[in-house]
Image (tube, grey):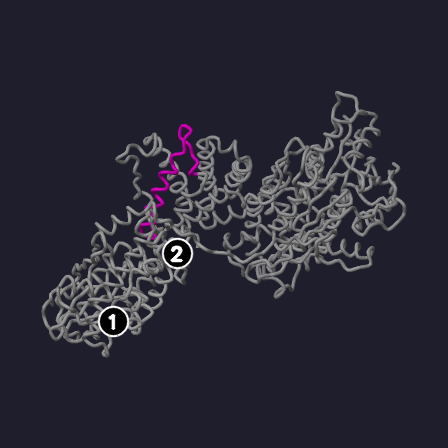
Amino acid sequence: MNNKPIQIISWKEDFIENLATTIINDSDGDLSKVTVIVPHHRPARYLKKALAASEQLPKPCILPEIYSFSDFVSSLIPKLTAEFPRKIGKLDQVGLLFNIIEKLRNESTGMLAKMPTDLQLFFPWGTRLASLLEDLLRQDIKPRNLTMLQGEVLEWAAALLEELEIIFVRYMEELEKRGWTTSGLENRTLVENFNGLDDILKDRQLYLAGFYGVSGVEDMFFRYLWDNLGLQVIWHSDPGLAAGRKGHFAVREHRLWLQNWKAEAVSDHSANGSCQLPELKFFEGFDRHSQLSAMREELCSQKVEGCAVVLPDTSLLLPVMHHLPEQDINISMGYPLERSALNGLVEAVLKLQENRNGRTFYWKDILALIRHPYLKMLEVNGDQPLRTIFHQWENALRHGAPYADVTDFVPVYSDDNGNLVDNPETTEELRSEAVQICIDGFKDIETLSELADSLQAMSEMLRQRGGTLWNRYLLDSECLFRLMNEVIPELRESSISNEIFGQSLCFSIFRQLLSSQRVSFEPDPISGMQVLGMLESRLLNFKRTFILDTVDEKLPGTDPYDPLLPDQLRHLLDLPDSRERESVATYNFYRLIMGSEESCIFYQSGVQPGLLDSKSIRSRFVEQLLWEIEQQRKEIITPGEEFPLKAVNFPVGAIVNNPAAIPKEPLQDKLENLLKFKGLSPSAIDCYVGCPKLFFFRYLSNVRESVTVDQDGDRAGFGDLIHSVLKDFLEPHLNKEICGKDLDAQALQDLFMLRLERDSLYPNLAYDIKKSLEQAGKNRLALFLKSLKPTKIVELESDSQAELEMDDFSVRIHGRVDRVDERAGERYVLDYKTGRLHLPRKSFWEDENIWGPLLDDPQAIYHDGTPFLEMIKNSADSLQLPLYLLMDHHTSGELPRQAALVELVTDGREMGLFDSKTGDEEREEIIETKIPALTKVIINNMLQEDSFKPIRSNMCQWCAYREACGS
């Protein structure tokens, strides 16, 4: 049979339209005997549309058979062999290889004999070994052993490659013995049965449409069809090849193809201008956001019909969707299942079990599960009541221990105002079902089959209880479909499904299986603007193309490192390496832009945050295009305001962070009621001086500080525990002369340990945190007794208060004083501190900038507002201790001698408010005049200021109300 010349459709022309015309003309309108082989499924949809729209084709008619290569091979194998082997997945391949390796270990005298017999360790190597064997079968290569690779690859890799030849032989034998096949083995079977193709395909018109680089079995198969069955090969390429020219560098594989087949090429299209670039616009942005902003602006500037947005990276899909104009848009690309919200739920379920501690679960893991939107959107009679119940559960978890038993939570379905949900009974049924399936159902997983059953139960609950969720969110629906119809069946039906692996290995296998799954989008109709991946764009032409993220790591991209057979060693087995992949990527890129009237190319040049803070490098394809333009213009192109290379810039100004004040007028009555009837504590006054807006949040609003479990030990709770222990230990010694060295330090430490072990959070703390708290508590208490000088304790944890007369009403300053001592007939007020110490500076009481105007004309500074408060805060740091003096003075009727902080953080020393230079008259003036006057000014400022203003300080970054404040 005379070989037909290879036909080239210019990459400047629409390939699908020209292919349809060629097929119709060759077949005289009878397409029933036509078979077309295309690289992938996407062009088949366009070809069918073109044939249906053609006026040359009489209707009705039978459309041609259109296959991808792998589908075509799968359809031929049963006809060639009269057998129907079972096509196995990755799990069966790994299980089969593990059995082979186990037997070889006993026979081997090499490294393989030293490898561990653990499937969990072998599984990641098994998946890579299965992929390597599939590559060998697709290339029709019988491998040889690769020895002496120690030091070049890891031990497992060296051991497997050392026995690769026998592993391959036994793998083939086991597949044949069990009646199994794989995609690679189908290729091998095809090669062995070429002679049978003549009878099967003798009456068919065969077209090979749009392939670029072929090797291995593909090359052998297509060559046989071309030599013997009249295969018509049609390329989308540079027609210069048909004119005897070398052609564009991007069509290198087509040039080699012609040489290897000793074929001729013809084209109906002119080679003149076939390598001329279309109009190109380059956009350089600092980050992804700048690319998307420029893309949207360009898209909105013209009609979107005939436009395509091409994404080299699937992670761009969701951000791009939020920047597209309101038009008919079709998405055609594979989206990784592991990036989906469904996988987020599955991961939450698995992590919950992995961090389990007996019957209890880590509180953050429970939180991640019940906050997942899929569970919160489960419906009962069209309602979604679990939102309310899960909010209760979250609140309970935040107030609980680090590890919680899910059975301890009892929902509240009714309060004083009635039912919180419409149907308490059915809601509780739904909640129990969700807990049983998502938590209890995944306990004690031992086999892949059990894991499959648990995943199936969860999927069925989501499907049946999800209401309209799956109709409204089609991406999520497709992900659930893929999980139920691809992943779960393989887990359940593989040959290793019932092997006892344990939870860890089962979860690991499942994650690896899931990572290989992609949810494909093949929408109809195929009109309107297209969003597709680089591979999905093959053979398709668009008027305008928008190619995003054209950085070198995406185009041509980098292959992930293969620890079994690194790229630099693939030539040892005659396997194609990264050079072939880069050649294909080059062709796909240039073919896409050559077929466009205009191409907009976007890339980012900013620093990518991460461990190494690497800078993005624009693709070598972009560099090549810019170089060609520079050659034409005879000048260097730099980013600027004009095309061809436009820098995407945004106006940058200073970041203004001025939290708004809270108007006081609506809260005036509430504030006055607080002052009249409840009064103020020293800590509340300190809070107001530090930040009036924080005072509003803490004492006048209904906004509560977010509660979270303290995994490092509750510092506030630890301080309360120390206070309680000291009170109970010292209480028997009230009104007695004591000294620390005479008290029993061991008894104090034993009391502390008893109270600590009774604390509800103590059992759930990590071992190191427990030991740290124990050691810190005992050490601090021992040092406290060592520093306790002779004294007489007269009051412990006593209530104390002072009344201040304001213009219209009196305000009570009240609180609890930790301890009052009597020394030489005078009172000493003491406050225990287990944290940072806050004392007014010694110069505070003599600062004329404060006390001059405050004592002479306090009315003048009522409205001085924030500057006055900041001056007080900067000089005094805290007013708690002076206010304790004032309260004790009013309560006892005596003038205290001193007030001091007991420093329990270090050595238990007393840090006094007054030093030895403070005389009696000065001390009396401070207690009876200055402190009351200062307190009245602060309270009047509360009443007369028109708003609660924020005061910025270093403490803002730790403030519990930071988000609500806007700082």
Q: Earlier in the sequence, mark 1 or mark 2?
A: 1
Q: Where 552 falls versus 825 (above or below)?
A: above
| Residue 734 appears in the rendering | yes
Q: Position of residue 453 (x, y in %)?
A: 45, 38
What type is the residue that disc 2 sits on?
Answer: Pro
Q: CA distance from mark 1 to mark 2?
A: 29 Å
What type is the residue that disc 1 sits on?
Answer: Leu
Q: To which quarter of the image does residue 224 belong?
A: top right
Mark 1 residue crowding within 10 angstroms, few (<14) / some (14–19) / many (20+): some
Disc number placed over residue 913 in the picture, else none: 1
Q: To which quarter of the image does residue 952 belong?
A: bottom left
Q: Which residues are magenta?
A: 375-403
Residue wearing tag 2: 950
Q: Position of residue 823 (x, y in %)?
A: 14, 74
Q: Give the position of the C terminus as an image quadrant.
A: bottom left
Disc number placed over residue 174 in the picture, else none: none
Q: Where 41 falls versus 569 (above or below)?
A: above
Q: Residue at x 40, y 62 (%)?
A: 953
Q: Residue at x 46, y 44 (%)?
A: 447
Q: Is residue 109 left or right of residue 299?
A: left
